[in-house]
Amino acid sequence: MTLTLLDWIVIAAYFLFNLGIGLYYARRAKGSTSEFFLSGRDVPWWLAGTSMVATTFAADTPLAVTGLVANNGIAGNWLWW
């Protein structure tokens, strides 16, 4: 399988977009450790939501939830929230 020019443009745009977001928030986080981890408690709702969803897609989350449900029943699904 070979990538076309359009594929490379989409990949480059994706990386540039993510780099831009990273540089923007890195500049805002230079004040202190608290500023770095909390972003001045001024993160837009869509970015906080995206971060939360991305966290739940981690490789270990399905394994952890499976273990919680196995040990605690279906109610165990809510323990990790």
Image: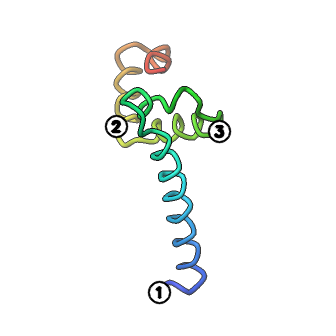
Please, is residue 73 above or below residue 51 in the view? above
Q: Residue at x 58, y 72 (%)?
A: 10
Q: CA distance from mark 3 to mark 2?
A: 24 Å
Residue that protrudes farthest toward the right in the picture: 45
Instruction: Mark 1 or mark 3: name the one nearer the start of the chain.
Output: 1
Horizontal and vertical percent position of residue 28 = 50, 41
Horizontal and vertical percent position of residue 19 = 49, 59
Residue 46: assigned label: 3
Amino acid found under the numbered disc labelled 3: Trp
Q: CA distance from mark 1 to mark 2?
A: 32 Å
Colour scheme in use: rainbow
Please, is residue 59 above or below residue 10 in the view? above
Instruction: Mark 1 or mark 2: name the one nearer the start of the chain.
Output: 1
Which mark lies nearer to you, 1 or 3?
A: 3
Q: Residue at x 44, y 30 (%)?
A: 35
Secondary structure beneath label 1: loop
Report the residue marked by disc 2. 60
Residue that protrudes farthest toward the front in the picture: 31
Horizontal and vertical percent position of residue 74 = 49, 17
Q: Residue at x 52, y 34 (%)?
A: 52
Q: CA distance from mark 1 to mark 3?
A: 35 Å
Amino acid found under the numbered disc labelled 1: Thr
Decide if residue 15 is on the left or right side of residue 49. left
